[in-house]
Image: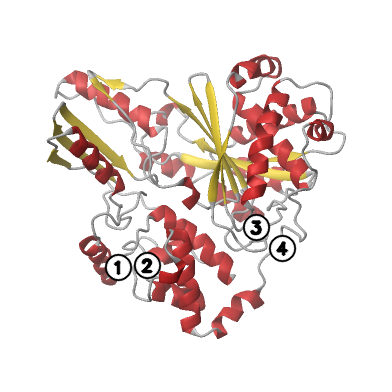
Amino acid sequence: QRVGGPWRPGVRTRRADSREQLAALLRAAADDPFDLEAGPLLRAALIDGPDGQTLALTAHHIVFDAQSLPILLDDLREEYAAGGSEAGAPGRQFRELAAVTERPAPEALARWTDTLRDAPSRLGLAAPAVPEPHGTVPIALPDGLLRRMRPLQERLGMSWFMVASAALTALLHHATGDPRLTFGFPVDTRERDAFARVVGPCLNTVVVPTRCDADTTVGAFLEAVRDGVLDALEDRYVPFAHVVEALNPPRVAGTTPYLDVVLAPQTRAHTPPRVGDARLLPLESAQGSATYGKFALTVGLAVTGERLSGEMVYRGDRLPVDAVRELARLYPLFLAAFAEPGESTVAQLAASLGATRGALRAEVDPGTAVTTSRATAVLAEPEAGVEQRVAAIWASVLGLDPARAPGAEANFFDCGGTSLKLVTLHAELCRAFGTELPVQRLFESTTVGAMARLVARPESPPVAAGSRSGDLDARAAARRRTRRPGTGGRV
């Protein structure tokens, strides 16, 4: 991670003569790709429209997390109320928080290693015989579910997220037949008094190990998950990368240890926020969440007022769509049952809900790492064959016609690629070629031919982090010059 010095964004001015033109300008502002090397990663535009002025702010997710938005809105309100005069001294900066969190307390890291030492680093999932496209399956959660959870939350001292996590992991224990598994969730690292108002990517990922045996009751499992989440939050400032480095679990190309399952909670404003007389509206991403593809299963849960909604985002090389649909069908049943638990065991409850034990069980050891023989075999493959395979994976990630796969000189970003899609491509290439590559290498090799050479000879030296060659600058400039209107994707 590189943290730059102080910087002030420029504001572009535009004009829209109709509401339709205004909507098109806003969509174009959101769809215009970011250049991660050259920046800027926060853009501002002021549009004079038929109903007044519209301020459009577009930020890349690597510099602006969800909690940054209410902080930024509060700052805008203060500046708006000040009427152009100085509203106050600048607050603490992200670079200060990053310097603190990069030095975790040794005892906190030791607690993490003790917690996860015997936990499985990979979930035993039965992958489809032929990889399927990544996708998203909505979860049909009933109205009133949050209200039904509250008595349980008060009795056991739990949040709705803890109950939702327990129901999901219980379902996965039953579906895989594994008595032990792990799940992760993102946490805010700014919750210290000195850094509460920091804007930036103030996120870490924490992991909760769970155990569910044949005689584990629903009540006991709820309490265990509650305690696991609280323990994880206690040491949330230890960077996840430090934990993985200390544990050094078996690596499997294209996956992240301990994070095959990730829960992503959100709380959304029931009514649009306001700054003075201005009403603020978010512009939802047009890019499908199925392109993310970083984890085997990501369960997104959002609270809007009294309504809980959700979706399951999955990787098609790890889970077949039919299995995810069955999980999405069963999850509301488990969640409703967990909201009002009786004395039954998890196994008894699952059976009463019609869940098939071991339906997702893998036939091989989920912790098996990729062997060197597979990674070496690609070196003997003709380069043209490697290019064809890379082009086919490109077509799958970008949603292109497989019969018209891009050629060797095609540029990923000019074909509609984005930084998030490049992360998906990275996972797919690592899995297909049985190799481990830093994702940075793909940002340095953006054509089919360059990526084919990279996976065929992964030992070639990378560009040092933080450095930029003239060639990189030239390629970044070329991408910006040659990017055609309408080919950019959302980042």
Structural distance between the alpha carbons of marks 4 and 2: 30 Å
Q: Earlier in the sequence, mark 2 or mark 1?
A: 2
Q: Are marks 4 and 2 in contact (CB under 8 Å)?
A: no
Position of 426 relative to 100 (above/below): below
Q: Pointer 4: what residue?
A: 368
Instruction: Name the kind of residue labelled 2 in the image.
Output: Glu
Specify which label sits upstream in the sequence, 2 or 3. 3
As drawn, is 427 to the left or to the right of 406? right
Q: In the rendered structure, which amino acid carries the disc numbered 1? A: Leu
- Which residue carries the number 2 mark? 444
Query: How far is the residue under mark 3 from the one under mark 1?
Result: 33 Å
Q: Residues within 10 Å of mark 1 (few under 14, many from 20)?
A: some
Residue 472 is labelled as 1
Residue located beneath label 3 in the image: 248
- Badge 3: residue crowd in 10 Å (few <14, some 14–19, many ≥20): few
Along the line of sight, which residue is nearer the eye, 268 or 444? 268
Between tags 4 and 1, which lies in front? 4
